[in-house]
Image (tube, grey):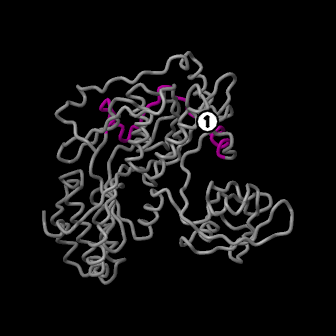
Amino acid sequence: MNQSEKSYSPRQVAMIGGAIATTAIFTMFGPAWCRSVRAALQDSPKAIVDQVWQLVNREYVDGTFNRKDWQAVRQSLLSKNYTSRQEAYAAIRKALEQLEDPYTRFMEPRQYQALTRQTSGEVSGIGIRMEMNEKTQILTVVESLENSPAFKAGIKSGDQILAIDGKLTYGMRIQDASKLIRGKVGSVITLRMGRNGNRAFNLKLTRARIEVPTVRSALRREGNRRIGYIRLREFSAHASEQMARAIRRLNNQQVDGFVLDLRGNPGGLLQASIEISRMWLDEGAIVRTVDRKGSSEITKAKNTALTKRPLVVLVDNNSASASEILTGALKDNKRAVVVGSQTFGKALVQSVHELVDGSGLAITIAHYYTPKGTDINHKGITPDIKIDLTEAQERRLAANPKLIGTQNDPQYARALSVLSNNYLAKPLQNLPSNSAVFPQTQIKRF
């Protein structure tokens, strides 16, 4: 290890997915290192270039670097003089292209910050969900999140947001309104509100850190059955605690079985996928990763399942990475019946690093396999019961999201039929892990 590598003091958090549907490990340099070194290097474009090269050289999953001379790449990179960070960024991207790996990628500071915000599961704002009323072109509140500034101020579903800090919102895009509403924690925002056709009024709110809900759950009464429906949108930092609350709440409501909806879920934090797997599994392997040296790491269930009730998992071709790890673990351990379309097929592990100038780098460092040793990369997971939506059905659900997870949703309806076929009477039992697939000598702990 060279001197530049020794100077790193990483704090690592495992992650899967997000916008690029990857398995990843976040690495951020320690605070003391950041203060002293970043100040000296953030204005040195060549230092950023060399840092990227060093990280790829140390971690990239393919030791041949796609049959490229990586040392020659370094010499070429460092032989140039970079007059700006943008020039250095362009050189970095060109060098990474030689790996022919779309998941090993460079992120400028704004892109890296967006990724870390997404996976943190938190935003700074007032805690509302809103939509644009297509008929009136008026920004309308869908929901105030519990314990948020908006909730405490009495903002209700159906309230209209007419202006944000004096800026009229008529016809405004949701994305633009969101940018205006978000801001520094502790700062004040003034909303012009309308309610039930009454006279408009101003409302001052103080922005706070808001936990973004990624888990939605509901008790569905389907005939004489009580079904716990849980939809997980992404594996953020708060997903596992939200999932635990949802399972416990539905358990208290005496549900007969569960439908876990992972459709459209692109992934998120690795630790969240492991923790959520353990909420459904008492025993068995969850996932195995293999690095470029051939070393394996296996993570297993720990007898911490929150429920043993029957479970059906819904997936589609946008269910990726962390979703596939969870689905693979439940399927291979025969804990759940998987219903829906073929999943995305992303089984590569990335590390995500914060660089000295606030930019970021994602590097493919390993491959992962399901408990039975299946390589799903570029293939995906085949559901136990394959049912693809027609284009007309997809358009209908997209146009009216309230139909998702109801009898008008063909994949959900099929999940109900699975639960009704004598499945509710006898929950599936977890099978022991396959020692032939995962020899004891290979087992390591995350």
Residue at (61%, 32%) from the top-left corner?
253
Q: Dot 1 lies on which element?
A: loop
Instruction: Check the image and report above or below for 41 versus 270.
Output: below
Q: Which residue is mark 1?
A: 390
> Please, which residue is most extreme toward the right here?
198
Seen from the viewer's position, the closer of residues 234 and 347 is 234
- Chief secondary structure of the magenta portion: loop
Residue 326 % position (x, y): 42, 38
Q: Left or right of 401: which side holds 244?
A: left
Amino acid at dot 1: Thr
Magenta stretch: includes residue 314: no
Q: Nearer the viewer, residue 350 or 158?
A: 158
Residue 386 x/y as whole percent: 51, 28
The image quarter containing residue 325 is top left
Quadrant of the drawing holding the N terminus:
bottom left
Where does the magenta region start and end?
A: 369-398
Give left or right: position of 117 versus 446.
Answer: right
Residue at 53% in and 32% down: 340
Q: Quadrant of residue 168?
A: bottom right
**189 horizontally vs 378: left or right:** right
What residue sits 38% from the left and 44% below the top?
346
Quadrant showing the C terminus: top left
Residue 356, given in percent of the width and then of the height, sits at 30, 73
Q: Is residue 22 above or below residue 384?
A: below
